[in-house]
Image (cartoon, helix red, strand yellow):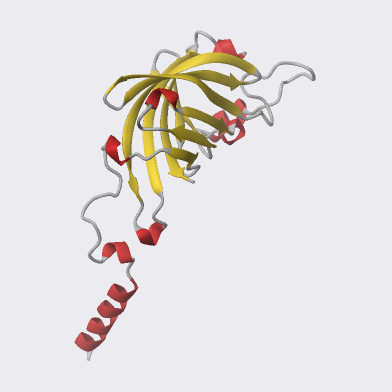
Amino acid sequence: MRRILASVTALAIVGTAPLWAQGGPSGPPGQRNASLITGGTYEADPDHTLVAWEIDHLGFSPYYGLFGDVSGTLQLDPTAPQNAKVAVTIPVANVTTASSGLTEHLLRAPKEEGGKPDFFGASPAPATFVSTSVKPKGEGEADVTGNLTLNGVTKPVTLDVDFYGAGKMPAQMGGAENVGFEAETTIKRSDFGMGTMVPMLSDEVKLKIAAAFTKK
């Protein structure tokens, strides 16, 4: 009897398993193959587009934080990559760190009315990046220059961008075309009005970006 019940249970589990687990593709749908990119307008995937930042903490160790929920668009023409355009918005108020105390400090209002916050302050405006030029420099690589607006200050920034992957989602997951990139750059936080504790905390902030886009 127990064997019969076990067999019935196993069949029920298999019957309700996700379709992509039953004889689905042996590898991920995205491939590091630029020929899979098609032209058009893509939207940032807010669940999988991340901006990680790193600063030097007192010379003892690096410290990391993260921004998510990124929105925006990417316009691509694989036959003319230099014409690509990207514009994204990063909700600074959603900054995440491993320390609740530090996260609170980053978003703390000035101690005195009319004063300057140490970092982002309470209810900070979202940051934006809008590209102004794209310079391909090799297979799947490009320098993307644009205007970064952060803490009310706009400065030109150049991203070192690498193509990560492209392809279609499985039909049972919507079948949309996707493309992704990695990017890196370094900025000075004092350029954006956040020079608190420099040089105890490094002025230079390294940014590493995972950018995922879905075709409209």
Q: Residue lying farthest bottom?
A: 1
Q: Residue lying farthest front?
A: 79
Q: Is residue 53 visible?
A: yes
Residue 123 in the image: above or below residue 188: below
Residue 212 on image: x %, y %: 42, 39
Residue closer to the observer: 93 or 45: 45
Q: Is residue 48 visible?
A: no
Q: Quadrant of residue 17?
A: bottom left
Residue drawn at x 58%, y 26% is 128
Residue 129 on image: x %, y %: 54, 25
Residue 39 on image: x %, y %: 41, 38
Query: How many circles with numbers are drawn on the protein?
Result: 0
Residue drawn at x 26%, y 86% is 5
**Quadrant location, the N terminus:** bottom left
Compared across the picture, whether 163 is left or right of 103 comes to: left
Residue 22 in the image: above or below residue 182: below
Residue drawn at x 55%, y 28% is 102
Q: Residue lying farthest right?
A: 113
Q: Quadrant of residue 34?
A: top left
Residue closer to the observer: 213 or 215: 215
Q: Quadrant of residue 71?
A: top right
Residue drawn at x 66%, y 28% is 124
Residue 88 in the image: above or below residue 173: above
Residue 6 on image: x %, y %: 24, 82
Residue closer to the observer: 157 or 135: 135
